[in-house]
Amino acid sequence: MQDSVVAELLARCRSGDEDAWRELLERYGALILSVPRRYGMKGAQADDVFADVCLALVRALPSLRDPKALPQWLLRTAARATWEAARRSKRAVPGEALRLAGGSLPDEEASTLEQEQAVRDALRAVPERCRRLLELLYFAVPGLSYDEIARRLGLARGSLGPTRRRCLDKMREHLAQKFAGEVSGGPRAPS
Amino acid sequence: MSMHVPFEDLLERAAGRTVRFDAAHLARCPHCRERVDAAHAIVAAGRRALAAPRPGRRAMARAVRAFRDGSAPPVPAFRLVLDTLLRAAPALRSRASARSRFLRFEGPATLELQVTTEARAVELRGQITPKGFAKEVVLRGGRARRRTRIGADGTFLFRKAPRGVVRVTIGDAAIDRLEL
């Protein structure tokens, strides 16, 4: 489902649709930016890397047909752009691992960033009400009590459980693609 | 024999809440332990993902300029091959003020359009052949943006299309200027 949405976005970008381009960047902007920031770049320097990746993406649009390959392509390109930006600025190349890899993101780092993107994609794929609930339940820092979550969402405390299950079911398949282990629900263990 | 711990409970625990379940089962069940790891990885990744900075307005504006300037490859165009204008005959039709225009385009696909104008309202119907050429049609004109899904039979409908000159984008291809 997500793949077909991204494939459609890419097709619309190829036809010059600016809205699709914005949507694509909304979807992947944080992923792109996470690479230079991971290697200590901030502000204008990180923005320069983001701009370089966007320019490369515009040029690569005709050949980018596989939506599944897009996050990895963006990470590779962002790593290379980060490396180049550091060299241009004559600062120490950030990140020993990045330096050793000559501008390639180490597999473990790439995997971590892809997992973050998978959660973003999964949250984007569920209805807004579910997204808010899942964010508050699992991803809020510091964690929130059920009472606080119910209050923020305007729900009865007792309805959180059933709603949570429905929302998790919707998010499940998107998460299963990127996280090892079975993420499906299972019969409740006797307490 | 106890059953596997529900994944939602494992997520709750990974998020720091106290959840009661069969600890003995968890200790001896490799399947559940694997899911514990997955739950912790999801919660950690989600927290990092939501805390990660997004590009600011300036960076986005710069990226949009790059797209406009650029480097966007030539768009396959639809070529107009038929354009006709029909006025409703008052004696034959109830919508005496309506007028319809039929257009046919060739290009990467065949596109037939019917533009019906009545008072200030414009309705745009279309059919694209082959079916499945694209999933969506986008109209852009001035500040107006409209999009609609293409049906399985290749047809689509904008009940209220923007008036004036619009750009019609269908999949990879476009009509650069269409006057509605």
Image (cartoon, coloured by chain):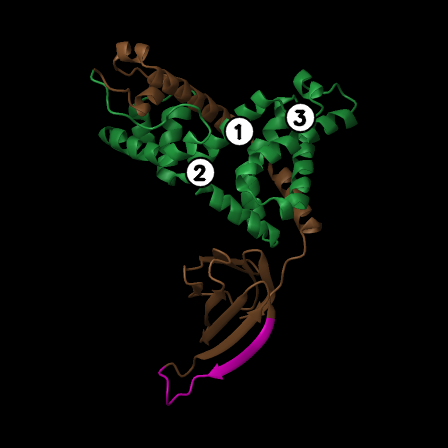
Chain colours: A green, B brown
In this rendering, the answer to whether B65 lies above or below A191 is below
- x%, y% of residue A152? 34, 31
Q: Is residue B42 left or right of residue A64?
A: left
Which label sits in the foreground, 1 or 2?
A: 1
Q: Which residue is mark 3?
A: A104
Amino acid type for the residue under numbered disc 2: Arg
Quadrant of the image occupied by residue B55: top right
Q: Which residue is mark 2?
A: A124
The answer to whether one can see residue A22 in this image is: yes
C-alpha span from label 1 to label 2:
15 Å
Task: Tell me the number on the disc at residue A174.
Answer: none
Q: Nearer the viewer, residue A95 or A26?
A: A95
| Residue visible at 67% across and 18% down in the picture | A95
Amino acid type for the residue under numbered disc 3: Ser
| Residue visible at 38% across and 28% down in the picture | A136
Q: Which residue is mark 1?
A: A114
